[in-house]
Image (cartoon, helix red, strand yellow):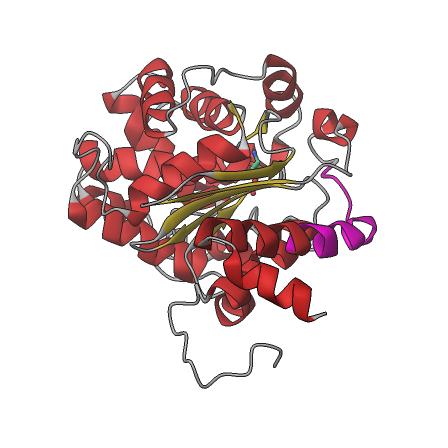
Amino acid sequence: MNNIIDRYRELTEADKTKVIISSAMAEARKIIPGGNVATYIPELGNVDPNQLGICLFPLTGEKICMGDYNKRFTIQSVSKVIALILALEVCGAKRVFEKTGAEPSGEAFNSLVELDRENSRPYNPLINSGAIAIASELVKEISFYDLLRFTRVICDDPEININEDVFKSEISTCSRNRAIAYLLESKGLITSDVDDTLNFYTKCCSMDVTAESLANLGRILANDGVFKETGDRIMTSSTARIVKTLMLTCGMYDGSGTFAIQVGIPAKSGVGGGLLAVSDKRAGIGVFGPALDEKGNSIAGINLLRNISNKLRLNLFYDPEWNEDE
Ligand code: GLU
């Protein structure tokens, strides 16, 4: 026993982090059977639910990747973070927040109930209604190809493309998003062509990324919008701050509050099983685990982040007096 403890003490910080992540992976794998892949987009129903991968990319130190970290999957709602960054940069915060609010919704990601009230707007840009309103502004300024190129840069992943099968599957079945778009149009919150807006939005969701690409993106957000190695600023400091704040308060659908208590870092999930998390000033984290809980978040991914956040003390409100197991 002492031998094992002595050997653990001799490990480098990076090796200790690897031990923590690998044991958290083993724990998280056990709960995969409690989740299900999304099937409302028919093509996503064909994804193997047993996959799990993570990439943690610290600002200083080596990138740690495990499991299915380089498997491609569709980014889905994590693309709302990228669209929001671009909208803030291209259209400006004033225009963005004329179209959507900045409050948690407490409703399902694809809810349209709030849109039926007089003078209401989507709660925030990280749920479907808000992201569709944002897409309708972006289509006035940029092409989808501009957004794709930006995504390749910010994710440091030139291989990102559209998964055509998932795109076709979603665009031909997206009655709910279509209903949201028409409601937004009726309220004057969409002034672009509805089909163009939905095509743009759905293409954003169909980009195929890896957990590693998401970690690269998270690392730029963790570093105040600056690419560490070159010093290139990819977005303003204000954009990085707004995006991280909205991820912390609204990024995990109607599970955002519980996630904030349990994990305590900004994150955004997607129904493809992706999770983007940001440990500010420390690391970007990408996770892929397509089995989802009832709210549409990766069931194993949340468990993994919870364990890692506890063990690596990532919670923004970390207090050394806490008992980690509480
Ligand atoms: N493309 C999906 C939709 O619009 C994204 C949902 C999500 O990942 O939350 O329903």
Q: Nearer the viewer, residue 84 or 284?
A: 284
- Is residue 185 visible to the viewer in this orientation of the structure? no
Q: Position of residue 167 (x, y in %)?
A: 59, 19
Q: Is residue 23 left or right of residue 275?
A: right
Identify the residue at image location x=64%, y=49%.
22
Q: Quadrant of ligand 1?
A: top right
**Viewport quadrant of the N terminus:** bottom right
For residue 262, what is the image quadrant?
A: bottom right
Q: Position of residue 94 (x, y in %)?
A: 17, 47
For residue 172, what is the image quadrant?
A: top right
Identify the residue at image location x=59%, y=24%.
72
Asked if residue 25 is among those painted magenta in the image, a careful observer would answer yes
- In the image, residue 82 sits, relative to residue 119, either above or below, namely above
- Is residue 193 visible to the viewer in this orientation of the structure? yes
Identify the residue at image location x=31%, y=17%.
146
Q: Nearer the viewer, residue 189 or 36?
A: 36
Q: Nearer the viewer, residue 209 or 285?
A: 285
**Residue at the right extreme, as displayed:** 33
Q: Nearer the viewer, residue 90 or 218?
A: 218
**Viewport quadrant of the C terminus:** bottom right
Which portion, as a residue range, is magenta?
Answer: 24-38
Most common SS among magenta residues: helix
Q: How many marks?
A: 0
Q: Position of residue 126 (x, y in %)?
A: 43, 47
Asked if residue 278 is among those painted magenta in the image, a careful observer would answer no
Q: Is residue 96 left or right of residue 168?
A: left
- In the image, residue 319 sits, relative to residue 62, either above or below, namely below
